[in-house]
Image (cartoon, rainbow, N blue to C red):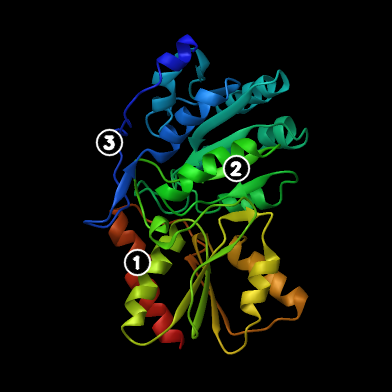
Amino acid sequence: MSTAQTRAPKTRLTTSAMIASIAAPGQRTAPAPFGNALVELAKMRPEIVGLTADLAKYTDLHIFAKAYPERFYQMGMAEQLLMSAAAGLAREGALPFVTTYAVFAARRAYDFICMAIAEERLNVKIVCALPGLTSGYGPSHQATEDIAIFRGMPNLTIVDPADAHEIAQATPAIAAHDGPVYMRLLRGNVPLILDEYGYTFELGKAKTIRTGNDVLVISTGLATMRALQAAEMLEADRIGVEVLHAATIKPLDLETILAAAGKGGRLVVVAENHTVVGGLGEAVAAGMLRAGIAPRFRQIGLPDEFLAAGALPTLHDRYGISAEAMARQIRAWL
């Protein structure tokens, strides 16, 4: 066994206390699922390295850094350099996992990801915290448009996990994929919900989590967790909600989505923790239109504006992505 392997932690480390959880009171959580999954994976994959732009504690990469300090690179507040260095390491046979905030990857380092990584199909995994409305710090930290920005980039796979259970499974899955990946990251004490449904992540596959005859909710990321909670609320009103989870945004599993949307008589709602412009909703709408499928269609997502700062529960309800707000909106549409 290597020296690096002997340093791997034997217990699951927790995240920084400065990171607030998006979990509801009393909801089950798991600490730093990405960081812990990466450490476990690195035991078997010595080519894995971790890089960050001064944000190890805030992307859960500090757990990997503690376990494998000789395989960890702190690049400072220089996201363009971060992406270029990852590209160079990938060219030499390493498997870089790069972390930063989603706003910095999408807005500040886009050209470097495009030219240095995606165009060359390099095996770099870009894992970014604070996707959508998961920060109360306002527009400087809220990556409400990151999927819209990256969907147009060729060769780039985009993944938006829903909870800790899925993050733990998606991490080795994206490592096994040959090519660049952008994964949105829920960090810290991340809620658990998909394990209750026996869910297994498969890259590129959308999966039905629960069935229902009245409404089809096609969702991704945090919105899937909220959609499942809203479905439980609506069940009390005898409203049956089917939830189809599309964790992989690109390539999108249109075959599964169109088969579900084509079942007549149901309201089709796309729910996402992202602006309604350029995300999953528009991708699904375009796919249905091209296929000649025209159900009643609505979107739940963030508005096309810069969002306010404040407490996350208040903001989620204000902008319509809390479970209660989703349930209210679906009731209103029926």
Label annotation for residue 182: 2
Label annotation for residue 318: 1
Front-lying residue, 112 or 270: 270
| Farthest front residue in view | 1
Residue at 33 percent of width and 86 percent of height: 237
Q: Is residue 330 above or below residue 48?
A: below
- Foreground mark, 2 or 1, reads 2
Mark 1 is on which residue type? Arg
Residue at 70 percent of width and 75 percent of height: 288
Q: Which element is circle 2 on?
A: strand
Q: Which element is circle 3 on?
A: loop
Mark 2 is on which residue type? Tyr
Mark-to-mark CA distance, 2 and 3: 25 Å
> Residue 297 in the image: x percent, y percent?
58, 80
> Residue 191 in the image: x percent, y percent?
34, 52
| Farthest top residue in view | 3
Label annotation for residue 18: 3
Q: Are marks 3 and 1 in contact (CB under 8 Å)?
A: no
Mark-to-mark CA distance, 2 and 1: 28 Å
Judge the density around disc 1: few (<14), some (14-19), many (≥20) Cα neighbours within 10 Å.
few
